[in-house]
Amino acid sequence: MLPLPNFQVHRATTVSGALELKARLGDSKFVAGGTDLLPNLKNGLYNTAHVIDLGGCRDLEGIEHQADGTIIIGSMTTLADIEASPAIRQHASALAVASELVASPQIRSRATLGGNIMLDTRCRYYNQSRFWRESLGGCLKLDGNTCRVTGSKTACMAARSSDTVPILIALGAQLVIELPEMVNWIPVCDLFGKDGRFEACFNIDQNALVSSVKIPAPKPGQRSVYRKVRTRNAIDFPQLGLAIAGVFEDCICTGLVAVVGAVNPRPKILQGMDIAVGTRLEDCIVEKLAESAFKQINPLANIAGDPAWRREMVRVEMRRGLKELRDQQG
Ligand SMILES: Cc1cc2nc3c(=O)[nH]c(=O)nc-3n(C[C@H](O)[C@H](O)[C@H](O)COP(=O)(O)OP(=O)(O)OC[C@H]3O[C@@H](n4cnc5c(N)ncnc54)[C@H](O)[C@@H]3O)c2cc1C
Ligand code: SF4
């Protein structure tokens, strides 16, 4: 059994209280559901003396469906609540699907959307016990100077394995980021850096708190799909995540966005998807798009699953996802 290290827990009851604690305590971590932070603390991945519990911040909970169709989700909303939300199931259905595919029911009843977005990047050489890592001498991300995956001495390529992130990007979602005396909006697609090290993997201040997620009102005829590859469907992190959002008018596609997750530190927005525009996503177009996706994604040996197989699955899942999108109503 891995014991938790010693740290002091501070309970916040409001956003401003949480920010005040963060500013006062210095080196500290927010904890939401704790389903990623606590295993990481047990593995000795962070050295923090203070943890700020956001569990009492009622102002961070809930799902609001506004009159114009915009959906606002508080960062402390659990994934279980998202998958069960009628508004999300109807207007951003692939987000409900992605939430439902995270881990297991027990974990989803604790795990929050904010924690899922702010998840640390993952790697088979990093998400291990201290004993395991020390036997190898660490790696660039922690306790070492060389990446075990690429041999690089400058960049970590750990995977961003959050299931909700690709679909939030495909739906054009934005985050509300709070710092003392400052509130900012940032598109989810701009949140992530190219380097998987914790201090570089988010393009926002390390003390910032994500307070909510805004999903714009769906366009008429908008459809969305999320597909996930993993070894054990009951619990595993994605070995590949694919989100597709498309807009259709009388079965003719007028716009298509596809985002691939669980490959690199930053989700990849696929290029060249506009060949779908003006088509009915006929099988020949689906094949072209699947081939294009395959060419753009080159998985590394950073997480479980042979990279060549994961790459092939990009083509397979793209094909399946596009056909699913084509067959949806709306
Ligand atoms: C067995 C197992 C399987 C899993 N499978 C999956 C999976 O399939 N897919 C998947 O996506 N995840 C998976 N996870 C990871 C995790 O359960 C989820 O990503 C979950 O949504 C994390 O949310 P949380 O509230 O528990 O985050 P926490 O663990 O509380 O926090 C995670 C990180 O986010 C930061 N954070 C949390 N909230 C905020 C906020 N509001 N503002 C700023 N920073 C914040 C924390 O400081 C921490 O660094 C799995 C975990 C386990 C243990
Ligand atoms: S990608 Fe490289 S540097 Fe990053 S965690 Fe894995 S082995 Fe370490």
Image (cartoon, grey):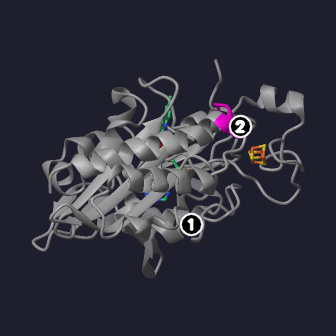
Q: Would you say the beta carbon of the disc 2 residue lies within 8 angstroms of ligand 2?
A: no
Which residue position is annotated with label 1? 207
| Residue at 52% in and 25% down | 231
- Name above or below for residue 241 compared with residue 182: above
Tell me the kind of residue under disc 1: Asn
In the image, 207 versus 63, the foreground residue is 63
Residue 330 seen in this snapshot: yes
Res 239 quadrant in image: top right
| Residue at 54% in and 63% down | 22
Give SS at disc 2.
loop
Q: Main secondary structure of the magenta part?
A: loop
Which residue position is annotated with label 2? 44
Residue segment shown in magenta? 301-308
Q: Earlier in the sequence, mark 2 or mark 1?
A: 2
Res 45 quadrant in image: top right
Quick check: 172 left or right of 229? left
Seen as rendered, the residue at the extreme front is 284
